[in-house]
Image (cartoon, grey):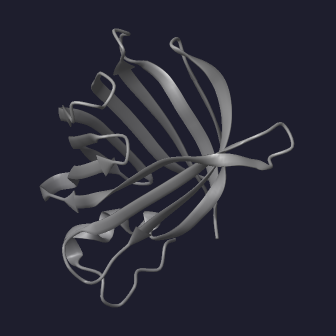
Amino acid sequence: MIELPSDIHPDVAPLAWLLGRWQGNGHGSYPTIEEFEFGQEVVFAHDGRPFLHYFSRSWLVDADAAKIRDAALETGFLRARAEGEVELVLVHNTGFAEIWYGSVQGLKLELATDVVARTNSAKEHTAAHRLYGLVEGDLLYAHDMAAMGQPLQSHTWARLQRA
């Protein structure tokens, strides 16, 4: 059972299992790039209002898990709606802004993009899908992406532990 903070807004109570700082490692691949390993830190924070603030930073690692260089940054707001529906507004350091819709069911959150906007200098990116779940106390996720003329397919996945 997840203990809810005393000041949690009732709208975000179904997302309370995400709260906190998570850290771990993941793997990435895509037809247009070489496979890679990464470290990641994800934070889901709440200040009593009807949303969670999401922040993620990642870094590429070598075979020994030593940091090679910084990689992706993303931040946004996860808003719970009626009957398990959720919306996410997300921006990335690579020049994307996205609006996602989905649902939370128990300890599973599933989202898909509705809108993807990009700057002139950003690479082509047209759609994405994310699945988060709490498994054996760890946060697991998979991120599928359609970009660079490729159809929607697996891009990154990770297992993060509560820090």
Res 126 seen here: yes
Quarter of the figure with the C terminus: bottom right
Q: Residue at x 18, y 35 (%)?
A: 117
- Tell me the quarter of the picture where residue 48 sits: bottom left
Q: Is residue 122 left or right of residue 64?
A: left
- Tell me the quarter of the picture where residue 28 sits: top right
Residue that lies at the very extreme toward the front in this rendered image: 121
Q: Is residue 88 left or right of residue 134?
A: left
Q: Residue 39: give x, y in percent of width and height.
A: 66, 49
Residue that lies at the very extreme toward the right in this rendered image: 64
Residue that lies at the very extreme toward the bottom in this rendered image: 6
Q: Is residue 18 left or right of residue 92?
A: right
Q: Residue 35: give x, y in percent of width and height.
A: 65, 23
Question: Is 77 rendered above or below residue 142?
Answer: below
Figure label count: 0
Q: Residue 104: give x, y in percent of width and height.
A: 31, 50
Q: Nearer the viewer, residue 105 or 142?
A: 142
Question: Is 44 rendered above or below residue 108?
Answer: below
Q: Residue 67: give x, y in percent of width and height.
A: 73, 50
Q: Residue at x 26, y 61 (%)?
A: 77
- Tell me the quarter of the picture where residue 9 sits: bottom left
Res 137 seen here: no
Q: Nearer the viewer, residue 138 or 69?
A: 69
Question: Is 101 rendered above or below residue 106?
Answer: above
Q: Residue at x 41, y 80 (%)?
A: 4
Q: Nearer the viewer, residue 103 or 44?
A: 44
